[in-house]
Amino acid sequence: MSAKLTTNDLEPFWMPFTANRQYKKAPRLLVSAERTHYTTDDGRRVLDGTSGLWCVNAGHCRPKIVEAIRKQVGELDFAGSFQMGHPKAFECASKLVNIAPPGFDHVFFTNSGSESVETALKMALAYHRAKGNAAKVRLIGRERGYHGVNFGGTSVGGIANNRKWFGSLLSGVDHLRHTHDLVRNAFSRGEPEHGAELADDLERLVALHDASTIAAVIVEPVACSTGVLIPPKGYLKRLAAICAKHDILLIFDEVITAFGRLGTPFGADYFGVSPDIITTAKGITNGTIPMGAVFVKTKIYDAFMSGAEEAIDLFHGYTYSGHPVACAACIATLETYQEEGLLTRAAELAPYWEDAVHALKGLPHIIDIRNIGLIGAIEFDPIPGEPGKLAHTRFVEAFKRGLLVRATGDIIALSPPLIIEKKEIDQLFDILSSVLKTVN
Ligand code: PXG
């Protein structure tokens, strides 16, 4: 099939999270990429304002990573990890725990963020059972949270459209209130001032269900998919303290915030909060090969190591857990991040980025602008009766003018590769502001 596709060629692929009929009438196709830019099928360069889908943190087609993948697939294409092993999986795990926050000394491999979430939730349940607290079975998520698309993640997730089609989901799940508060916090720079007390919502759920029935709380340190909700100052620390008080495990879903997005290796580092389990994916291989990893504290791993030595300790895993090609990609990715200082580069760029995104204030329909690390979001007043239309139209127009942004609801989210230069940040906001001025 050539790069030029006709409508019929487009039909068989049922695209995820896409308005298929609308897209196929006017497709947007990418055929190659290098560093901060994509190239389209009609030969236009497009600045990647979204790091793919929040995953290509070191920029596209980085030679070291590409070469490591090529070499690995020709040398050892597959080896399983059930009662067998290959050296790269162990090397990869060691390298990952070396950059993880203190106390995280084991990783479990998956193939995606969704699988990392399922794994973490199952670990939390099994942990309490192994400790003799088998009644701790409830899982707590948060309104507007996104934890992937499998049944556990959908159940603890809090985005109504992602839930309502799919039946009654897991039982024994409840949700904290979300933290979005435009009345008090609109146009905050970085962490908003107001709302730490929303963490006390967990005490409400403890009063309702009793702590003896609650296994874990899962939250994204920054809730990105729903349109970038940044935690109020002190909120995550307060949530962690309440979890600790009640022996409830705290899971940070860092599928987006891990690997430098906030200017620290992990979101846990940024907020100075130490959860019990961290889920990751995306940036772990710079988006090149599907992979996820669940990081656990010593106490979690140890809880599973008290039975007979010859007994399997965790009845869970995937054919491709620790896939050799993914591990090679991950190792080369971590080396690239380290060689180029990318796990902290967002901290250097953040002040410039913050000024650039907040300079959009005053353009038509903008009701909020928010930022943290190398993430920005612009929220629009919805067109009555047509939720999401304005952001979508503006996203389509930005793409035509050479910029890829992510539209979600009435919000445009930005998360460029961490290698972006200041002049490219200027270029990004030149295009975006011209779109926001003209598309209303
Ligand atoms: N947890 C979090 C916090 C995520 O952001 C997942 C789990 C699921 O990961 P997988 O690899 O199963 O897709 C995610 C994924 C967007 C967008 O534009 C965000 C995600 C995926 C696709 C688009 O906001 N996040």
Image (cartoon, rainbow, N blue to C red):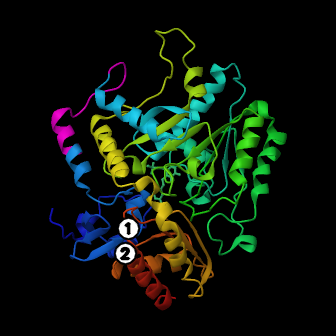
Disc 1 residue type (three-letter):
Ile
Please tell me in which quadrant of the rendered image residue 174 appears. Answer: top right
Measuring 62% from the left and 30% from the top, which residue is drawn there?
Answer: 125
Residue 52 image offset from top left, x and y in percent: 37, 61
Left or right placement of residue 297 versus residue 433 in this view: right
Measuring 75% from the left and 73% from the top, which residue is drawn there?
Answer: 183
As drawn, the label of residue 157 is none
State the separation of the CA atoms marked 2 and 1: 6 Å
* Whether residue 381 can be seen here: no
As drawn, the label of residue 420 is 1
The answer to whether 297 is drawn above or below residue 355 in the figure is above
Q: Estimate how packed mark 1 is, as few (under 14), some (14 to 19) or many (20 or more) residues with alpha carbons within 10 Å.
A: many
Left or right placement of residue 331 versus residue 43 in this view: right
Q: Nearer the viewer, residue 199 or 11?
A: 199
Measuring 36% from the left and 45% from the top, which residue is drawn there?
Answer: 334
* Whether residue 163 can be seen here: yes
Mark 2, secondary structure of its residue = helix
Please tell me in which quadrant of the rendered image residue 134 appears. Answer: top right
* Mark 1 sits near ligand 1, with its Cβ under 8 Å away: no
Number of numbered discs on residues: 2
Please provide the residue range marked out in magenta. 69-84
> Residues at badges 2 and 1 in contact (C-beta under 8 Å)?
yes
Measuring 21% from the left and 76% from the top, which residue is drawn there?
Answer: 42
Instruction: Kindly identify which residue carries mark 2.
Output: 424
Residue 298 image offset from top left, x and y in percent: 57, 27
The answer to whether 309 is drawn above or below residue 167 in the figure is above
Extreme residue in the bottom direction: 438
